[in-house]
Image (tube, rainbow, N blue to C red):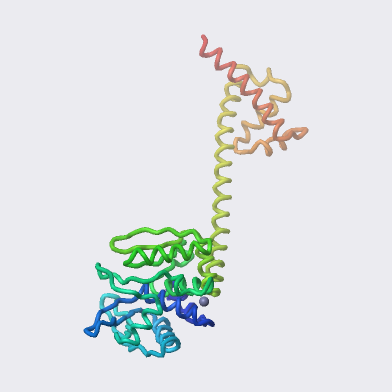
Amino acid sequence: MSFSALVKNEMCRIQNEDKCCALCEISAILRLGASFRREENGFFTTSISTENAALARRIITDAVRLFDFHPSIAAEKRKKLRGHTVYIAELKGTFATGIALGDMGFMEIGKEGNPLFSDINEIAGGECCNRAYLRGAFLAAGSISAPDKGYHLEITSAYPGEIDRVRSAMESFGIKAKATARKNHYICYIKESEGIADFLNLTGAHKSLLDFENIRVLKDVRNNINRAVNFETANLNKTVNASIRQCDDIGLIERYIGFGNLSKDLRAIAEARLENPEMSLDELGKLLDPPLGKSGVSHRLERLHRMAEGVRGRESGT
Ligand SMILES: [Zn+2]
């Protein structure tokens, strides 16, 4: 089962204690997932299709609980969706269902065939309802990537107005969401793992949030290890490159000046470096008698470098 389906199944098990929240949730499902057809009597028949059986059950129970309607339900196998079953809940257009749709914020079908809804705040009772609204929006039109694949949560709609409302509802909880258009769809999405975690938390998907966080922590640990390994590699390269330059200097000094003409200290470090080109300055210092710290080693190698530069100057001068 996909992570999206796991999250939705968990959301469908959440009880909306207050009727205001149940109303906002089903309103969101309607806003983002329903299609409307005007009947000859002038009222709208509404249908919502979903692949998620738990969501289909939730729509029916909520309709019964809130409005005392029992939507008809049909199951279809769709070839397009690789033979997946699609559930279609339908509410026939009557005077009574017209009132119920009005309670959910439905107003009219616009000129371009798009359903027009009132602002969600006109039916929302408070913060609890905004949470329920976002949960409904995700149930009807949301998806989330499995956290081991990447961080992405999105809610899509054919209508930009509702996507704006989804976005501002997210922002009212401090979640940074972006909106964009893809072909003929509008999308509100969250890319930051932090924001996705907040979304799962505020919509009540706590078990999914735990799974999400566990994988997120594992991923962060792995990233930190990679970063440390990269850092080590970079350091190693620095050591190797420096050592190549130092061995160049020392080779030049050996040829043009001779180790016999170096002070005891400089000769010791020159020989140690030539014999151990792979060692760090720390390790090199420990080979000396008496041992020398990193900065002492660096200082002596610097003196050898200046000496070699002198040789280079003389050689190119003649
Ligand atoms: Zn509420």
Q: Position of residue 208 (x, y in %)?
A: 52, 73
Q: Say whether residue 167 is left or right of residue 238.
A: left
- Name above or below for residue 119 compared with residue 100: above
- Name above or below for residue 256 compared with residue 207: above
Q: Position of residue 72 (x, y in %)?
A: 33, 89
Q: Position of residue 268 (x, y in %)?
A: 70, 28
Can residue 301 be seen here? The reply is yes
In this orientation, which residue lies closer to the viewer: 306 or 124? 124
Report the residue at 58% width, 32% height from top: 242
User: As drawn, which residue projects farthest toward the right?
Assistant: 290
In this orientation, which residue lies closer to the viewer: 99 or 135? 99
User: As drawn, which residue projects farthest toward the left?
Assistant: 40
- Name above or below for residue 314 compared with residue 285: above
Count of numbered tags: 0
Report the residue at 28% width, 63% height from top: 184
Q: Position of residue 187 (x, y in %)?
A: 37, 63
In this orientation, which residue lies closer to the viewer: 83 or 264? 83
Asked which quadrant contains residue 17, the reply is bottom right
Can residue 3 be seen here? The reply is no
Q: Say whether residue 155 is left or right of residue 250.
A: left
In this orientation, which residue lies closer to the viewer: 231 or 237? 231
Q: Where, quadrant-wise, is the N terminus in this rendering?
A: bottom left
Q: Say whether residue 301 is left or right of residue 165.
A: right
Q: Say whether residue 214 is left or right of residue 163.
A: right
Report the residue at 25% width, 82% height from top: 42
Asked which quadrant contains residue 79, the reply is bottom left
- Name above or below for residue 306 compared with residue 8: above
